[in-house]
Amino acid sequence: YQGTITIPVIVNVLYSNPSENVSDAQIASQIAVLNQDFNRRNPDVTLTPSLFKGRVGDMQMNFVLAGVNRKASNQAVWQADDSMKFSALGGIDVTQPDKYLNMWVCRIEDSGYELLGYAQFPGFPPETDGVVINPRSFGTIGQLYPEYNKGRTATHEIGHWLSLQHIWGDGPCGVDDYVRDTPDSDSPNFGCPAYPTKACGGTLMTMNFMDYSDDPCMYMFSRGQVTRSRWMFSSPYGPRQSFVA
Ligand code: ARG
Ligand code: ZN
Ligand code: CA
């Protein structure tokens, strides 16, 4: 598939207090971030160190808000078990996942720890397809954690929705992320890593959206990640083909 891919977005908001009922403006701020990050138009991409400048990729994906569903709930925190994706469990059912990227915005935890977000990879059941984002790391306005106030949690989770693995392949040196131009890495990087940060015999791409760096310190996808993600739409076997059909 050539050129820009349009991805209509449905936002499903589950809230137990007013600050979790993210405003239309907060939703718009998240869509705006996606349209920068997925079109190499984010201003901070200029921070890319010269070593990696030639590897910066352009996803050429355009996100369009297609609808917002809101539901008040007396459940304050949701487990990362997909219950928020089913009205029968108090959540909001998915909308046509072959045509829309579904985003659920709600507080989430896993084994007692708060999560910023989680995603479903391509090829899993349609009923649970999409990404889940914490209202405190969603968009660039509203009540946000300062380290996560640039909307990059959704950028990262949509990376997973497009089949991208974490940059360290969720394992030590030698475990692959199936992308050739992202350097081998041994573990997640947090905070704002100094450049260069070295491991596995090389310089790490800590500024990649698929690492765990703070929002202001992640600002690029690689060309290899773009190839892998776009294949999901362009291949006849691509699990996201229905978006361009
Ligand atoms: N799944 C990760 C978490 O919940 C998301 C990391 C997003 N990182 C970021 N800088 N926004 O911790
Ligand atoms: Zn992740
Ligand atoms: Ca790699």
Image (tube, rainbow, N blue to C red):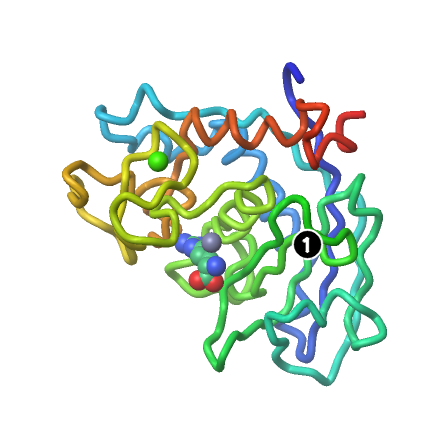
Q: Is residue 166 visible?
A: yes
Report x, y in % for residue 218: 36, 44
Q: Residue at x 51, y 50 (%)?
A: 151
The front one of 175 and 136 is: 175
Residue furthest to the bottom in view is 74
* Residue type of the residue flagged with mark 1: Met
Q: Quadrant of the C terminus?
A: top right
Residue 94: quarter of image: bottom right
Q: Where is residue 181 drawn, in percent x and y?
A: 34, 28
Q: Which residue sits at x=55%, y=62%?
A: 142
**For the image shown, how many numbered marks are present on the structure?**
1
The N terminus sits in image quarter = top right
- Residue 133 placement, left or right of 101: left
User: Where does label 1 land, which residue?
Assistant: 103
Mark 1 residue CB less than 8 A from any atom of ligand 1: no
| Residue 149 in sight here | no
- Find ligand 1 in the image and state its quadrant: bottom left
Looking at the image, residue 107 lies above or below residue 172: below
Q: Quadrant of residue 85?
A: bottom right
Q: Residue 88 at x, y = what percent?
A: 85, 75
Relative to residue 75, is residue 10 depicted above or below?
above
Asked whether 200 or 221 is in front, the reply is 200
Q: Which residue is situated farthest in the front direction here?
A: 174
Name the residue: 78% across, 57% down: 127
| Mark 1, other Cα within 10 Å: few <14 / some 14–19 / many ≥20 | many
Apparent side of residue 32 relative to residue 213 in the rendered image (left or right): right
* The one of 36 and 233 positioned closer to us in this rendering: 233
Q: Position of residue 95 (x, y in %)?
A: 83, 52
Q: Secondary structure at mark 1?
A: strand
Residue drawn where x is 79% and y is 41% of the image: 98
Q: Is 25 on the left or on the right of 59, as rendered? A: right
